[in-house]
Image: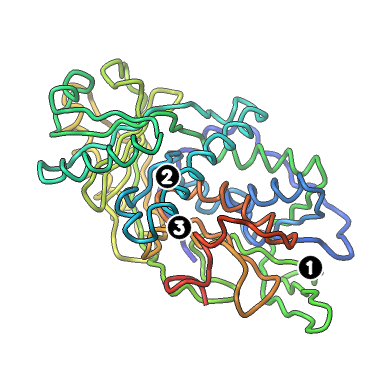
Amino acid sequence: MHIHEGSLYWPTTVTKRFKVLPVEKSDCYDAIIVGGGMSGTLTAYTLAKEGLKVAIIDKRPFGTGSTAANTGLLQFSNDIMLHELAQQIGEANAIRFYKLCYQAIEQLEEIAITLQDRADFIRRPSIYYASSQEDVSRLQKEYEALSSNGFPCEFWTAKEIINHMPFQKPGAIVTQNDAEINPYKFVLGLLEKLQEEGVHLLEGIEVLDTPQDEETGIITVHTSKEELCAKKVIYTTGYEPLPFGKRQGAEINRSYAIVTKPMKSLNNWYKRALIWETKRPYLYLRTTVDNRIIAGGLDEDSPEAPSTDNIVHQHADKLVDELQKLFPHELIEAEYMYGATFGESIDNLPFIGEHSNQPNHFYLLGYGGNGTVYSMLGSNILIDLIQGHENEDAHLVTLDRPNGVI
């Protein structure tokens, strides 16, 4: 599947890519992870910490799929507001899910600290502004839901926004303790660390089939190069078609992003906050360590990345125009631009767990704007399920739900 088109920024920030070393294959792995991006890497990290023998398989070079197009915003707030999620799954469940997202950012920071340059992990506030006056009441209700449940946030009026930013909006929630990260640095740095600790990395290999012995439960992983043995298989394949199973509650679309040339000054940008809005599809933006702006949005109902650079350039021009409206005194010039496939679930929750009809086959599909955060919290759930332990949060994201994976 063609998942991105255009010029990517993150690969230019890594001067030396680690080398995947040849390995002597295990007789039978405790788990084989299919997909070597953010979800696969974090799952391998969590399993390896528990002493499991793990291999990661990717048909591409590691980190070059959706990870290379990930814009690296880490937020505990989700595409669906807390008070609206409470109406969907119940207040206690919604609060718990938000707290899992909050904790996941803390865990991502703990990992990033161990990597070179911390993978450019930096704590940032987020500004979630009302795109129109009609959205202010929703934001006020969301602020009440967040603050009453202990999430660090404040509400800004239109006057407070103009005091902190060069643009005016009718209202905003400002949340604390979110973060930005270089996802490409993070994944490659963590993979190098995992390889040193004994995780087997097998790139340029495609999984073709995963038949299972009915008596032993052992899975034979047929690949484009060889057969491998595993007790469990975990699909962290992102937006690619699933090797086994069918998504019945997901929409695969595409979005666009630009990365500007380095800016002379961003001093009028409050604490370099992550910024997004209530309109759907929404515009979102952040800064980088070398003083660029990353902006994304303009989502389209198409599962494939754009087919030509011309389409990418047209959308990049629109994103530049949107940025110029927000920062009228800056010269906005895009240096990198691309379109990429992304997935959203209908109920705004990721797909994490064991397939109901195929034991020992697991999924971690972090669909939505919080994919990296979902990958972290999902790996925590999977380690319990894979080891046969109960996990009190698994029901929140189970595949076995009306909009799940069959």
For the residue pair 78 and 64, the one nearer the viewer reads as 78
- The answer to whether 109 is drawn above or below residue 47 in the figure is above
Give the number of the mark in front: 2 or 1. 1
Q: Is residue 260 visible?
A: no
- The answer to whether 78 is drawn above or below residue 254 in the figure is above
Rendered residue at 53%/32% (across/down): 13
Q: CA distance from mark 3 to mark 2?
A: 23 Å
Q: CA distance from mark 2 to mark 1?
A: 39 Å
- The answer to whether 276 is drawn above or below residue 340 in the figure is above
Quick one: label 1 or label 3, which is nearer the N terminus?
Answer: 1
Identify the amino acid type marked 1.
Lys
| Image quadrant assignment for residue 54 | bottom right
Q: Secondary structure at mark 1?
A: loop
| Image quadrant assignment for residue 176 | top left
Rendered residue at 62%/31% (across/down): 110
Name the residue beneath numbered marker 3: 367
State the image coordinates of residue 136 (x, y, percent, origin top left): 16, 40
Q: Secondary structure at mark 3?
A: loop
